[in-house]
Amino acid sequence: MTPDNNHEEIKKLLVENQRLLMENNQLLHKMRRAALLGTLFKFLWIIIVLGLPFYMYFNYIAPNMDTIKENYSAFGDINENTQSLKSWLNDLRQTEQN
């Protein structure tokens, strides 16, 4: 190996090393950006999953709570009425059997 040939080989190796360093740097920047975006999307997903029930409650359920309570009490009244009808039917059947 002559000294001139050795310098050329070292220069080629340095150029290749520089190219690899630049490529590695680009990959690291892409990885960092992907990790940051992944973290942001996870954070937004958690906010949506935990916040959506509260949003739905305060905007749709809470304003209509009086109506919901009235409907629930109406169902309770229907249940009481059906119980009285059942007892009336049982009394009627017993009188027919006698």
Image (cartoon, grey):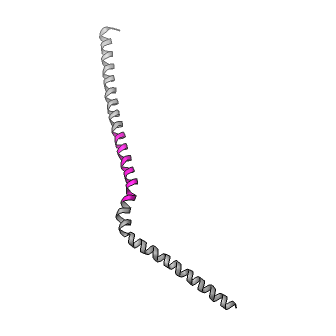
Q: Is residue 91 left or right of residue 58?
A: right
Q: Is residue 71 left or right of residue 96?
A: left
Of 49 and 73, nearer the camera is 73
Q: Please state, as top left, top right, bottom left or bottom right, where the N terminus lies in the image.
A: top left
Of 51 and 17, nearer the camera is 51
On screen, residue 19 above or below 5: below
Q: Main secondary structure of the magenta part?
A: helix
On screen, residue 6 above or below 66: above
The residue located at (39%, 69%) in the rendering is 65
In the rendered image, residue 40 lying in the magenta stretch gets the answer yes
Of 32 and 27, nearer the camera is 32
The residue stretch that appears in magenta: 33-54
- Percent x, y for residue 49? 40, 54
The residue located at (36%, 49%) in the rendering is 44
Q: Please state, as top left, top right, bottom left or bottom right, where the C terminus lies in the image.
A: bottom right
Of 41 and 84, nearer the camera is 84
The residue located at (30%, 17%) in the rendering is 11
Mark count:
0
- Percent x, y for residue 57? 38, 62
The residue located at (55%, 81%) in the rendering is 82
Which residue, as the protein is rendered here, is positioned at the far right? 98
Quarter of image, res 6: top left
On screen, residue 50 above or below 81: above
In the rendered image, residue 34 lying in the magenta stretch gets the answer yes
- Percent x, y for residue 48? 37, 53
- Percent x, y for residue 43? 37, 47
